[in-house]
Amino acid sequence: MPTSTDLLQGTLDLLILQTLAPGPMHGWGVAQRIQQVSREVLQIGQGSLYPALYRLEYKGWIRAEWGNSENNRRAKFYRLTAAGKKQLDAELATWDRLSAAIALVLGRNAEALS
Amino acid sequence: MIREFFTRLRFLVFRKTPAEVDDELRFHLEQAVDQKIAQGLSPVEARRQALIEFGGVERTREQCEGERPGHSIPNILRDARYALRMLRKSPGFSLVAVLTLAVGIGANAIVFSLLDALVLHPLDLPGAENLYAIQQGRDHAASQSYPDYLDVRDRTRTFDGVIAYTIAPAGLNISGRPEQVWLYEASGNYFDVLGVRPYLGRFFHSSDEHGANSAPYIVLSYDYWQSHFQGDPQVVNRTVQLNGFSNTILGVAPPTFRGTEIFISPALWTPIVNQPQVEGFSEMQARGARGIWLIGHLRAGFTPTQAAGDLNRIAAILSKTYPGDDDGITFSLGRPGLLGDMLGGPVRAFVAGLGLLSVLILLAACANLGSMFAARATDRSREVALRLALGSTRLRILRALLMEALFIALGGALLGVALGATLLRTLKAWHPVPNMPINLPIEPDLRTYGVAALLALASGLFFGLVPLRQVLHADPYQGIKAGNAIGMARRAFSLRDLLLAFQIAICAVLVTSSLVAVRGMMRSLHSSYGFNPDHALQLNTDLDMGGYKGEQIPILQRRILDTLTHVPGVTAAAYASRIPLNIGWSESSVFSDSTTDYRISNVAMGALQYEVSPGYFEAASTALVRGRSFTWNDSKDAPRVAVVNREFARRLFGPDAKAVGSFFKRFGGTRVQIVGIVEDGKYKTLSEDPQPAVFLPILQSPSSWTWIIVRSPRDLREVAGAVDEALRTLNTGLPFTIDTWNKELGTALFAARAASLALGVLGGLGAMLAVTGIFGMAAYSVSKRLRELGIRIALGAQPKQVLGAALGRVSTLLVLGSVVGLALGLAATRLLSYIVYQASPRDPLVLAGVVLTMLIVGLIAAWIPAQRALAADPLLLLRQE
């Protein structure tokens, strides 16, 4: 199974944005969420996660503020900005188009081989 | 995207603290531990496994930092500080490098300023791109006649303004004593067409012109107003005497405006309709008298080609209507400011040649620096290896090296531009022609600085990237092991060798060209002028300035001559309306004796015309070959006679025919008999082809211009004093300029001398650069191989063998480079012949000179390293590392 480090930078950004869409979350929460939803396939370590979060923050798509976690620890919470929401929608559309195209090509190949 | 930009800007200013990342990571770790505990592991085991999974935090920290906008700025600053420190550590290298580059960039800055001022933007006026000089004839002469000007001005459809102007000397009387000034005579629309506004007062306009001598107005130039009127604002509407006639000062021109010819700094402008008063004669009615220059302002929407076509339409009309004067006339356009193409052509060629040579110098300097930097990089291979091993990227190392190069380039550029500016300022203060206000008003401006900055950047990148290959392929292990790269692979010819050879070649080219120039100049000084300027004084005055007219002129001239002949020490004296190799000449049409129709196409030749007094040829030491010279009997009422030179006789009658006693005709049908033949000489410039010349008795063609030659074997300063005294007692009320003839000749030789000087300087610079380059290379090679040389000496090598080992490669490169450079220099004869008089590089003296120079250069440069090589003490060296 390809590890999280094989994920393209842009795809990781998309995953994070989507994960933050429902509401604010801290870094650990985002990683856990992605792991859960992807049924343990995508495991994102801190080495990839935090640079990505910082990158998104510097681009203005997410905003960070310190707060208290569920178990009363100090954590930094990230939330989607309006610009981020727009970016998310755009990237989702692109992703849909792209993955459909890839699926077509791969699907045809699979048919031909079987 | 804009929002993203602003966000990044915000984060650039409000930086996060690095501690934030740590806090976040700590939280992340704690959560992971908690999760593991919840899965059933013991706290200790949970923490251990969590830490393993966590991985290293240093990398994460760095990556987060790397995402921050502006994160590279402190790195760059650090690199810059490091580069400066490195440069300070080797002051000798840095100084030499900066000086070398300063020379290269300075030379180019100067040449670019020249190019800008003389070729690209000669007239510094708004809309100057639409100004064109209107020339006539097959040889694009700038001189036109006034009636032709009126026709062009009135009939043209493509110019919305055509101005006419000429320059002339006159006597301006401000405070009692008349002083000679040079002024522009300009058409009424001059200032309006050019778009100049007055600095003070007002200008004259077309509406002020009502015929000859109708507009007694003067406009002062800013410089003259400052120097002679002390910048007094009350000068407007003051009356002064110009050649004895009252004129009113209308105003002052702006400080940046010197008129429409670049080299001349006039005192004032006066309407051209005043020509009779200013020059004592009027050519305004004579269609064939071509003494003025025209500039036209192209109308919007028309191209120069269309304008030229329109002008030739007018030319066709003129040719048909006035067959006597304008038969076959054509017009063409040229760039204004340098007498059209007449001066413009040679000047442009000269500047282009200079430009090429200065680019060569810059290339040589870059090659020099490139090899120096490459050597430096090799020296620091250990340091580079260390940095690589510690985790620096090659990119960062390169960046640091590049910074050093750029700093040197910056320093070199600043110094170079400063030197160039100083030189230009000196040039501006130089007055090559003693009597005329001629100078080169050239200053570096923004464009020059821009070009210098660009050159600095390009050069810096060029020689900074020379060690590129070395750094990219540097192996850290090899670097640290081998000490100082002794074990580097020996290739036949490395990049550094190529650079040195290139540099030497360029130096050889420069030395060749400068030697050619020097030879040419020496030849020009010794070629036959057709007169002997040694032991002779030259006096000059204009009788108009004292208000003398008509019959008074020849009488006064005779009196002056008699007085001068009686000054003790004077062996011969004579006067003329103008003399050869001086400012200005007059050409007149010569027709054969059988001509009856005096139109331009029937002209046998155009001969240079001089009106001279009896005794002129003796005074000037011009050899009379056949026949006789003039006497006082060749007066106004006597038959018209002339003395011509050999070239004239040859062209009109053939090489063997007898010319003395034959006749020729002048314009208008006057028959003139040739009574004598003199030797050929130089009349316009030193590098001209043989020219026909005709001398007329001044009594038959009087002129108020008076050039006097006084010959004396005594010390010329004493004689000058005596002459001055004698003239003062004569009390003519005229200002006289007195100089030795040789000094006056400076005018004619000026261009050739300036060119030779420039080439000589460039040759010298090239040689200097080559010396530095060879020295650097030789010194480096010796110092690298000192150990080896010490061993050789210990094993019994003779001094010759040691030298051979140490300097063998350098010598090979010297020879190779010189040969290539010499060949290139010879190949460039065509280019050089434009610039230098009688440039023929196939002169054996030149070849010998180049070989000798390169040999000397090599010897000087390699002397110290050679001594060092020979003095290598094997014991000392083997003990060192």
Image (cartoon, coloured by chain):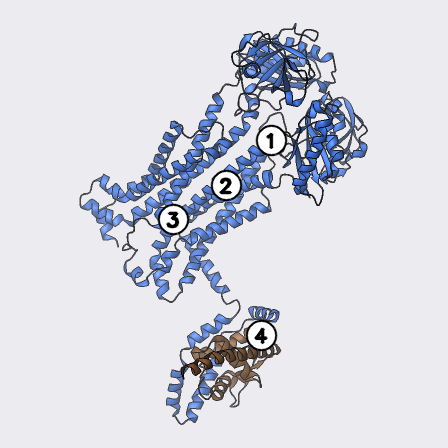
Chain colours: A brown, B blue
* Numbered badge on residue B107: 2
Q: Which residue matches tag 4?
A: A60
- Quadrant position of the C terminus of chain B in the picture: bottom left
**Residue at 59% from the left image edge and 44% from the top image edge:** B445
Find residue B325 and report its image quarter.
top right
Q: Are labels 4 and 1 on one chain?
A: no
Q: Which residue matches tag 1?
A: B342
Residue A48 as seen in the image, left or right of residue B744: left
Question: Closer to us: mark 4 or mark 1?
Answer: 1
Cα distance in 3D space between marks 1 and 2:
27 Å
Disc 3: which chain? B
Question: Dot 3: what SS?
Answer: helix
Question: Dot 1: what SS?
Answer: helix
Estimate how packed mark 1 is, as few (under 14), some (14 to 19) or many (20 or more) residues with alpha carbons within 10 Å: some
Please name whichever residue, B164 or B496, is drawn nearer the observer in this view of the structure. Answer: B164
Question: Closer to us: mark 3 or mark 1?
Answer: 1
Residue B346 as seen in the image, left or right of residue A105: right
Residue B819 drawn above or below residue B179: below
Q: Quick one: label 2 or label 3, which is nearer the N terminus? A: 2
**Residue at 40% from the left image edge and 78% from the top image edge:** B56
* Numbered badge on residue B371: 3
Cα distance in 3D space between marks 2 and 3:
21 Å
Pointer 3 with pointer 1, Cβ within 8 A: no
- Residue B737 visible in the current orientation: yes
Disc 2 residue type (three-letter): Ala
Q: Quick one: label 1 or label 2, which is nearer the N terminus? A: 2
